[in-house]
Image (cartoon, rainbow, N blue to C red):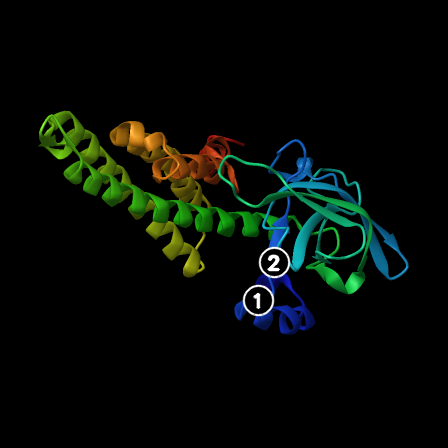
Amino acid sequence: PILDAGSEEQKKEFLPKIANGELIFTLALLEADDIHDASGIAVKAAPKDDSFIINGTKLFVEQAINADYMIVVTRTREGASPEDGITLFIVDAKAPGVHCEVIPTIGMEKLCEVSFKDVAVPKKNILGELDKGLPIVSKVMERAAIAKASESLGAMDGIVPMTNDYLKDRVQYDEPLARFQALQHIMADMFISLTTSKYLVYKAVWMESEGLPCAKEVAMAKSYVNQNYKELSRLMIRLYGANGTHREFKPGLYYRRAKAASIAFGDTGLQREKIASAIGLVS
C-alpha cells in the first residue's frame, strides 16, 4: 500500500528499508466480528492538534509481535455509508499505548491481538487520503489474497510429492503402499488438484503483475486453493495412517496450517461472494 498510496516522503523513508529487510510491516484490519468489509471497522482515530488518537482492538494481526510498523485501518468519521470515513495510518508498533499479545493457534502462527489505547499518530503518517482509504484496503486485500494463495500452493506442492514418495517407501503386507490401486487413485486425484490449482494461481498472479483487472481471478484462485489445501492435507494424513498424527511427521502441521491459510484474507465463502458479484449475480 505504501508503494501505491504513500506520499513521496513515506516512500523514501520506508520502502528501501522494507526491501532490504530492515523494517517489518504488517496489516491490522480485522476486528472482533471478523467482518472483511467496511462495516466491520470500528477502531476509532480522532483528530487532536497535529495528530490522531487511535483507540480500539485489532485481531489476527500477522507477526505483530515482531513488526516495526503496522498499517492500521481505522474509522475517522461516521459517514452516510460504512464505506465512508475509512483512513489508514502507519503506526509504530512499539509506540506508547500499543499492546500486542500472541493468540494461541493450532498452526502455531504468530497471529496477534493488538490493542490501541490513546495512541498518538502524526498526521503525516496518514496513508493515502483522509476518510478515503477503502479503495486502498480493497487493493491490499486482493494482493494479499493471491499472495496467501501462492503460499498455500507452495505447501500443496510439498504435500503431493512427499505423500507420493511415502507411498513408494512404506511397506505393508510385504508390498509398498503404492501398489494398492485404491491408494493410487487417491494419489492421482491429489496430482489433479495440485495441477488445476497451479493454473488458477498462476493466471491470477500474472494478471496482477501486469496490472490487469483480476478481482474475479484472484477470488477463484483463493477459493479453489482454500478447499484443495485442506483436502490435500487431510488426504496426506489418511495415506500416512497412524504416522500422519505424530508430531515428528509433517502431515499434521500441514493440516493445521491449511485451516489458518483458508481464513486469511478472505475465506471460501467470501471469495465465492466476490465471484458471484463479478459474474453479475449480486447487485
Give the total of numbered labels: 2
Residue ID for mark 1: 18
- The image's mark for residue 25 is 2
Residue at coordinates 54% horizontally, 67% vertically from top-left? 21
Q: Residue 183: name its quadrant.
A: top left
Q: Is residue 89 left or right of residue 276?
A: right
User: At numbered mark 1, what does the secondary structure look like: helix, strand or loop?
Assistant: helix
Q: In which quadrant is the N terminus drawn?
A: bottom right
| Residue 249 location (% of width, % of height) | 34, 39
Q: In which quadrant is the C terminus drawn?
A: top right
Query: Do the residues bearing badges 1 and 2 touch, measured as CB atoms within 8 Å?
Result: yes
Q: Is residue 120 left or right of residue 278?
A: right
User: At numbered mark 2, what does the secondary structure look like: helix, strand or loop?
Assistant: strand
> Amino acid type of disc 2?
Phe
Of labels 1 and 2, earlier in sequence is 1
| Residue 252 location (% of width, % of height) | 39, 35
Q: Report whether residue 193 is seen.
A: yes
Name the outermost residue toward the right: 49
Q: Nearer the viewer, residue 187 or 162?
A: 162
| Residue 39 location (% of width, % of height) | 68, 35
Q: Residue 189: name its quadrant.
A: top left
